[in-house]
Image (spheres, rainbow, N blue to C red):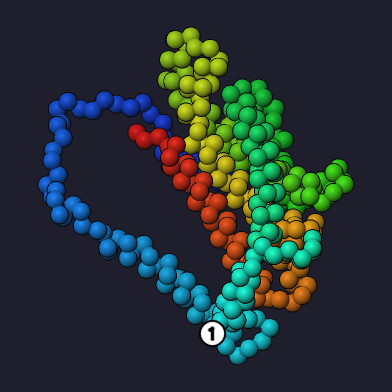
Amino acid sequence: MFHSPRGEAEAPSSSLSPLSPPSATAPAQPAANAGPAAARFDWQGLWMRLLPPLLGLALAIGLWGLFTQKGGAFPTPGQTWASALQLFAEPFYSKGPNDQGIGWNILASLQRVALGFGLAAAVGIPLGFVIGRFEFIGRMLSPLISLLKPVSPLAWLPIGLLVFKSANPAAIWTLFICSIWPMVVNTAVGVQRVPQDYLNVARVLRLSEWKLITQIYLPAILPYVLTGVRLSVGTAWLVIVAAEMLTGGVGIGFWVWDEWNNLNVAHIIIAIFVIGIVGMALEQALVSLAERFSFTE
């Protein structure tokens, strides 16, 4: 059976279990504090959610300003903020292929991530299902996956350049190979953890293989699949910056490297914040999607 290390396959927080009918002996009780008290806004909860992040951000900016107050090559927070206002005043200008606004570079990187990640999902999710469903195939492919999964994604970039003879397909190939493993592993683990009772019921009902997949396996493994998707898209966005630094062209990674060649450190710091914000937005979007499709006990 294909088994994944616990640290590699992140199990979702919810589990799949049959829904039990509501108890007839426990009638619903009216809310004790219904009325104006129930409509009272939880200001304390909102304050506790906002205050710690704001304090952490203020502390980081304060330390940054403290270490840069004597000047030097590293810009101060004020100088970086002024550069950001100027940079985002016209994010989509274009003065040729090597002189474009940061907005075009972000969109180019997102396009590469979408292509590489989409190809990885199209291959990795079915492959993970087959590995988890059929023990023989799982035993056959498990050593190969264990061998290739720890390889650095950038080690695959020269192979892509050799095969595709072009930087853009090579970068997409690198994203594909780094994104596929979390989806393969999590999908396979999800298939292996389908409760045996469900499979016994399906065997008694003599469900076809198609109905077994769509009515038993798919609802059960969906949280695992979404967990793998979330890990994969985070890895892809992490790798694209390094890949674009090496391949050049248009993209946020190439933009960072080009700003370094121009010794524009303020723009590099801005790019770091932009990369983090975009990655956080992708992560949060997939977390919200996973929560919508999670199953409760």
Residue 266 picture location, percent across and down: 65, 76
Relative side of 249 to 184, left or right: right
* Near-viewer residue (143 or 18): 18
Q: Label 1 belongs to which residue?
A: 66
* Near-viewer residue (279 or 35): 35
Quadrant of the rendered image containing residue 71: bottom right
Which residue is pictured at 45% across the width and 25% down the height?
195
Residue 241 picture location, percent across and down: 69, 58
Which residue is pictured at 61% across the width and 45% down the height?
232
Looking at this view, name the residue that lies furthest to the bottom: 70
* Near-viewer residue (171 or 59): 171
Residue 126 picture location, percent across and down: 63, 29
Vertical comparison of 110 with 289: above or below:
below
Vertical comparison of 135 with 103: above or below:
above
The three-letter amino acid code for the residue at tag 1 is: Leu
* Screen quadrant of the C terminus: top left
